[in-house]
Amino acid sequence: MNGLSNRFHGVLDYVTVIVFAAAPRILEFGGLAEWLCYGLAAVHFTMTVATDFEMGFWKVIPMSLHKWVETIVGPVLIAFPWFVSFGIFERVFFVSVGLVIVIVRLLSNYSERSTSSIDVS
């Protein structure tokens, strides 16, 4: 099955880190939403640099674990804002980011080597 290459997936992972890190200041989040953004930026950055793919540096996390984590995180981010007292902007942000993670997860092939993938270099 064709899909997003690991390289392009990695680029999207780094963009996700930037979005999480910048959101509290740009969108003026405070409290739980702010700390959740910073925490997710740190965890996502660590996971990305440690994943065994073209965009990783340490290459200690297998792609199968990376895939599993994204399979869980996307839906959790979609559901979580409905269980805490977030405002509308926080709720829309986390649901939107969760949806993007789910879509990227579904479009990614998570292969070790792929020659038929979409490779946006």
Image: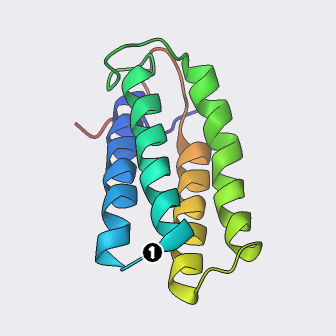
42 and 71: which one is in front? 42
Coloured how? rainbow
Quadrant of the rendered structure where residue 22 is?
bottom left
Q: Is residue 2 above or below residue 23?
A: above
The residue positioned 37% from the left and 46% from the top of the image is 12
The residue positioned 30% from the left and 72% from the top of the image is 25
The residue positioned 53% from the left and 38% from the top of the image is 108
Name of the residue lying farthest toward the left: 121
23 and 74: which one is in front? 23
**In the drawing, does residue 98 fall left or right of residue 115?**
right
In percent of width and height, residue 17 lies at 37, 49
Q: Regarding mark 1 in the picture, which secondary structure is present there? A: loop
The residue positioned 58% from the left and 44% from the top of the image is 105
Q: Which residue is mark 1?
A: 30
Q: Residues within 10 Å of mark 1 (few under 14, many from 20)?
A: few
106 and 41: which one is in front? 41
Quadrant of the rendered structure where residue 109 is?
top right
**How many badges with numbers are in the image?**
1
In percent of width and height, residue 119 lies at 33, 35
The type of residue carrying mark 1 is: Gly
Q: Is residue 22 above or below residue 86?
A: above
Name of the residue lying farthest toward the right: 83
Quadrant of the rendered structure where residue 45 is?
top left
Q: Is residue 70 above or below residue 95?
A: above
**In the drawing, does residue 76 fall left or right of residue 8?**
right
In percent of width and height, residue 24 lies at 37, 69
Identify the image quadrant of the C terminus: top left
**In the drawing, does residue 1 fall left or right of residue 59?**
right
Identify the image quadrant of the N terminus: top right
Name of the residue lying farthest toward the bottom: 88
In percent of width and height, residue 73 lies at 65, 48
